[in-house]
Image (cartoon, grey):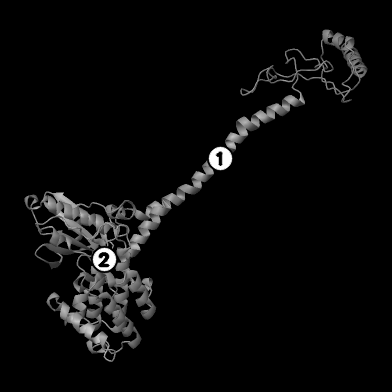
Amino acid sequence: MGAPSSFVLAVLTLHSVSAMGGCSTVDLPAAQPSHRRLLQDTNLAARPEANIPVLVAARVPSEGSGSFPASSSPRGGHHPTPNEVAPPAAAGSSPHRPSKSNDWLTSMRWLYLTVLPAAGLLLLAGIACWLLPCRKSAVATIGPWKTGLSGQLQKAFVTGVPKLQRSELERACEDFSNIITSYPHYTVYKGTLSSGVEIAVVSTMITSSKEWSEHSESCFRKKIDTLSRINHKNFINLLGFCEEEEPFTRMMVLEYAPNGTLYESLHAEDFEHIGWRGRMRVIMGLAYCIQHMHELNPPVAHPDLQSSSILLSEDGAAKIVDMSVWHELISKGKTPTDGELDPHHEQVSAALAGNVYSFGVLLLEIISGKLPDPAHDRSLVSLALECINNGDRSLVSLLDPTLNDHKEDELAIIGKVIHACIQSDPRNRPSMREITARLREAIGISPVAATPRLSPLWWAELEVLSAAEAG
């Protein structure tokens, strides 16, 4: 009886499904009698909008996956219309089978709640993985002393002039035994960093805080502020300073120029004299640098512009230095303007015009090779004016006899510039911008050509700046 009964049950079930308007594969070989009666007694028509065979629901577990319930929730689920009736459910299964709409909603939920956030996280992780190596590679190049500049010196090109430790400078200057020159008020030491980059360390001769007045401290700090604003390749730039009380220390760290002063190259017998083209390069370097100082805001006038205040780089380029502060420190008078001028102050024009006059005297010294002793300054200027006013003689009679390769056209323009610079009335003197333009037109040396070509310190600065910008 078992086999025929099962066969009859299957036939009856197929007949009942056919009566409902469709046929499907049946997966209920062991259906209970109550289910058979339900199938036989229910005679609903198929959905008019879709004449599709109805699948008999298979057994579906009621437990969810953990993230979403197995059946649709009343809030977001699909409610059947009067023409839609859920297929009969097997015992223990969910009363409703998710429709295509529910499937779509579930897919969208997975998309918004899982797929999109995961994709966003992956995108952010990818960007971080791409940026991190770039940052690491940039920062890795500026570890302390790797470029020849200490960690403190590296900050000079990002945050301003740094305050340095005496112990660091003492090591660089061989316990302050490497003296370049010594004056009554200050001493200049030569220092060498680990990479071989050379620096100059200038120290006051005052060794006690009792001898260091408020006036001295004011001059020292004002000069640091002024020098930190001048950033030109034809200027001995300030790299740092040191101030400590035990032992008492006031120092400035400057660039180092190895070829001495312009004064020595023009007048000392044991120095190699400069040829015409080299002197023209010095003139243009001075002109470009002084113009830069005058056009700062507020403008800066050099307080003591003479050939002893001009150093020469390894390849003979001019480097202006300002050592006036070390004389001002011990003065008993009021605090000077220290070179920096208020653009609205009545003395600004006089100070800038004074630089123009000094530049004219420097031109005379450079082309003549004559000693510019202040006591003989006016006589040299008077002699130059006499030569310039006599068109036949020009400045040839004042020309340094060692200059056999000079150019007449360049000398003629230089004579006219000198004549304009040394006018007795400051109001009649040209600006440095006008002087520079006139000289460049005649001599043809650009700002780049007038600056030092061989300077390891400038390359070190460039490396530090590039790494800081990349980071």
Q: Position of residue 218 (x, y in %)?
A: 17, 52
Outermost residue on the bottom side: it is: 392
Q: Secondary structure at mark 1?
A: helix
Question: Disc 1 versus disc 2: distance between alpha carbons?
Answer: 62 Å
Q: Locate residue 34: give its quadrant.
A: top right
Q: Position of residue 423 (x, y in %)?
A: 25, 75
* Residue 80 locus on image (x, y percent): 78, 17
Residue 419 visible in the displayed image:
yes
Q: In which quarter of the view is residue 270 placed? A: bottom left
Q: Tell me whether the residue at label 1 lies in contact with that at label 2, contact meaning CB atoms closer than 8 angstroms.
A: no
**Location of mark 2 (residue):** 352
Count of numbered marks: 2
Q: Amino acid at mark 1?
A: Leu
In the drawing, does residue 42 fall left or right of residue 363? right
The residue at 37%/71% (across/down) is: 447
Q: Is residue 371 left or right of residue 457?
A: left
* First-in-chain label (1 vs 2): 1
Q: Using a 10 Å C-alpha cutoff, classify the residue at mark 1 as few (fewer than 14 neighbours), some (14 to 19) or many (20 or more).
A: few
Under mark 2, the amino acid is Leu
Q: Is residue 24 above or below residue 140?
A: above
Secondary structure of the residue carrying tag 2 is helix
Q: Which mark is residue 185?
A: none
Q: In this rendering, is residue 376 above or below 119? A: below
Determine which residue is flagged by label 1: 122
| Above or below, 68 relative to 394 | above
Q: Nearer the viewer, residue 17 or 27?
A: 17
Q: Position of residue 395 (x, y in %)?
A: 26, 86
Q: Evaluate whether residue 278 shows in this view.
A: no
